[in-house]
Structures are given as C-alpha cells and as structure tokens.
Image (cartoon, rainbow, N blue to C red):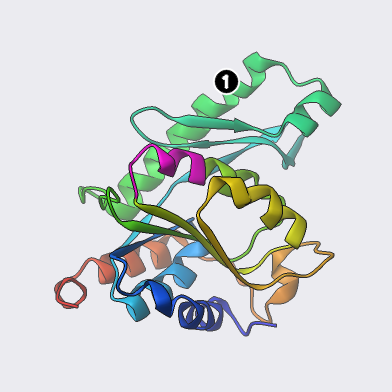
C-alpha cells in the first residue's frame, strides 16, 4: 500500500494541506513515525519534534501492551484496562515498568535532541504522526499528555489504522486523518513494501535537519 515511510509521509502531507495556515507543529512518535513526520513538517512548513512514548509490556509478554507512559514534567501513564484485568496485572508492576521506561525515554531525548528545547505547542495546531496504529495504546497516551500542554487543536495523522481503533481515539483528538482504514489489521508493516527499522541515527539526523537554519527560514 505504501512504498516506504517517505512515500507514506508525502501522501499524508497531501491530506493535511488544509492545516498549513493553522500554525501547525508536527510531533512524531519515534522511531518509525519520524520519517513520516519529517515529510509532513517539510510540506507544511512546520517545526518537527518528537513526543516520546514507551509501551508498558505485560508480564512475560512484553509485546502485549498493558499500558504506555509519556515523558514530561508530570509523566502520563495510560493503562490498557482490558489487558490489565485479563492478566491480573498489579499496579506496582505498572508503576515499576513506567519508571524503567521513563529512563529510556530520557536517554532517547538526550540522544535525539541534545540540548534543544522542546517545541512549544501552546496555542498551535499539534499534529501527532506515527507510521501506523494497531491497538492505539501509545497514541492515546501521547494525545492525553499533549492535552496538558495547551495546544489550540490536536490532530492525529497516520497512514494506516483500523476504524475501530480510530473510533476509540476520537474523544482524545479534534481531528483524525488516516489514509487507509482496513477493517482487519495485523501488523502495521504489512501495509508497507519496505518497513525496515528506523535507526536512532536516522531519527537524530532528521530532527537536526528539521531544526536547521533552512527549516527555520521556511
């Protein structure tokens, strides 16, 4: 469906043109959301930053999201209540895993952004971008954390996501733009011809490029 994340980003940017004059800022979820978000930011002439979210895996099944945590002065933890109940996950487990993931979030922010201050979203149209959504747990956490920062409008923009997940996220955002909405969806990667892992080096390079003098002059 998409050649790669660059293709997805360019196609997504075309669908977001109506936001160009809404003072937008693009917030990408690393790592895979950054190449997509870079193309969106470039097309809209908007600043690019990351919103750092980490999944909290279930005990003995780390790929299963029991929740997610977002960085910030007051970190936000979002629980996947269905998974928490089904697996009898203790609150102490959630909090301990959240602390561990916050350490990784801090490492990544230093790596990706160095000493650059986060881009302010207050009073702006904040566009949250990822390369696709399956369950929506991490995106929900990102949107809830973003609400505390005072944007004028929150927009969720993704190349692909199932309609039931998007419906569940509708209350967390003012607008959703999703290019493809398959009724059944396994992994996000099945909708890309090339879904190679995005490296930390690529994320750092794209963010530095987006923050450079030419970008600031757009």
Residue at image point 50% right, 55% down: 174
Residue 59 is a magenta residue? no
In the image, 17 versus 206, the foreground residue is 17
Q: Is residue 23 left or right of residue 199?
A: left
Q: Is residue 139 above or below residue 77?
A: below
Q: Position of residue 74 (x, y in %)?
A: 38, 27
Q: Secondary structure at mark 1?
A: helix
Q: Is residue 132 above or below residue 86?
A: below
- Magenta residues span 143-151
Residue at image point 19% right, 78% down: 218
Q: Is residue 6 left or right of residue 109?
A: right
Q: Position of residue 71 (x, y in %)?
A: 42, 37
Quadrant where the N terminus sits is bottom right
Q: Is residue 22 above or below residue 151?
A: below
Q: Is residue 88 left or right of residue 154?
A: right
Q: Position of residue 88 (x, y in %)?
A: 81, 20
> To which quarter of the image does residue 204 belong?
bottom left
Count of labels in the image: 1
Residue at image point 29% right, 53% down: 113
Residue at image point 57% right, 20% down: 95
> To which quarter of the image does residue 153 belong?
bottom left
Q: Visible in this render: residue 60?
A: no
In the image, 88 versus 22, the foreground residue is 22
Q: Which residue is mark 1?
A: 95
Q: Position of residue 149 (x, y in %)?
A: 34, 41
Q: Visible in this render: residue 176?
A: yes
Residue 144 is a magenta residue? yes
**Label 1 neighbourhood size at 10 Å, few (<14), some (14-19), many (20+)?**
some
């Amino acid at each position: 469906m998409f050649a790669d994340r660059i293709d997805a980003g360019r196609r997504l940017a075309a669908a977001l043109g109506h936001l160009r004059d809404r003072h937008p800022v693009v917030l990408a979820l690393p790592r895979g959301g950054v190449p997509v978000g870079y193309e969106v930011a470039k097309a809209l002439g908007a600043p690019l930053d990351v919103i750092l979210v980490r999944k909290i895996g279930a005990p003995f099944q780390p790929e299963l999201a029991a929740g997610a945590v977002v960085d910030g002065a007051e970190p936000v933890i979002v629980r996947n209540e269905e998974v928490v109940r089904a697996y009898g996950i203790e609150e102490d487990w959630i909090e301990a895993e959240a602390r561990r993931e916050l350490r990784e979030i801090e490492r990544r922010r230093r790596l990706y952004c160095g000493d650059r201050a986060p881009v302010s979203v207050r009073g702006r149209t904040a566009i949250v971008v990822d390369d696709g959504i399956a369950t929506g747990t991490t995106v929900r956490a990102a949107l809830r954390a973003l609400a505390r920062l005072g944007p004028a409008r929150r927009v969720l923009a993704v190349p692909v996501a199932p309609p039931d997940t998007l419906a569940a996220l509708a209350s967390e955002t003012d607008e959703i733009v999703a290019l493809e909405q398959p009724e059944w969806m396994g992994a996000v990667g099945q909708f890309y011809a090339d879904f190679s892992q995005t490296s930390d080096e690529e994320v750092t390079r794209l963010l530095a490029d987006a923050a450079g003098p030419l970008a600031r002059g757009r």
